[in-house]
Amino acid sequence: MYLSSFDVGARPEQLVGLVGGQLRAAIVVNALDHREAARAQWLENQTIKLRALGFTVQELDLRKFFGTTDRVDETLEQFDAVWVNGGNAFILRRAMKQSGFDVAIADLLARDRIVYSGFSAAVVIASSTLRALDHVSDPTEVPPGYDPAVVWDGLGLLPFSFVVHFQSDHPESEAVGDEVAFYERHQMPYKTLKDGEAFVMDCT
């Protein structure tokens, strides 16, 4: 896994090193399905940056797999990495559940078949819970076609939670103190990431 607080972070060469192979990347921008203009802008921005690193890039719109969760497995098998854009963590988690991406990515990681990477919302949902995230993401924002029920369970890929944009020049940096307070109050393990920093985990 390559998890950055914001954007590609300061260690993109390590992302390339983790992936190796043909550098085929799927990019997921569903965390911005509630903001179409920003969605298009970030899709273009991140595609350019990943291509500059040597990746071939194709968008993976999880909405196309809603209700047909068996198909997302086959699609993900075609990629070496998935890059998940930031945005609303609750929208992203809904998209992953409704498409079956959450189950598929856990299986692929267990088989060492793919690199899970991304920033912001992509990072914070990798833990087991989203309970502290309503301070920075609105759980009531529900784009068309989405199940309004809030998914509070994270992907369970990490045994601790991440606090991103920590002490950074980012609009959400002020609010993340509430996340830290939540984890400390409930004695839950967590780590912080400042913008520019990235967490790299190589299980090979």
Image (cartoon, rainbow, N blue to C red):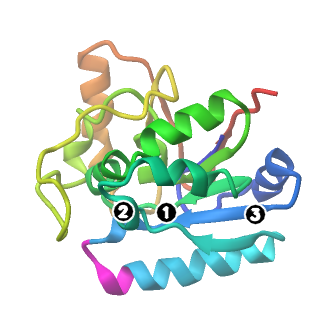
Of helix, strand and loop, which mostly describes the magenta segment? helix
Residue pointed to by mark 2: 31
Q: Nearer the viewer, residue 104 or 171?
A: 104
Q: Nearer the viewer, residue 158 or 64?
A: 64
Kind of residue indicated by mark 1? Asn
Residue pointed to by mark 3: 24
Q: Is residue 35 magenta?
A: yes
At numbered mark 2, what does the secondary structure look like: helix, strand or loop? helix
> Measuring 33% from the left and 57% from the top, which residue is drawn there?
172
Binning the other alpha carbons within 10 Å of mark 1 as few (below 14), some (14 to 19) or many (20 upward) gives many
Residue pointed to by mark 1: 85
> CA gap, disc 1 to disc 2?
7 Å
Binning the other alpha carbons within 10 Å of mark 2 as few (below 14), some (14 to 19) or many (20 upward) gives many
| Image: 160 above or below 84 | above
> Measuring 31% from the left and 71% from the top, which residue is drawn there?
33
Direction top: furthest residue: 187
Quarter holding residue 179: top left
**Stretch in magenta:** 34-38
> CA gap, disc 1 to disc 3?
16 Å
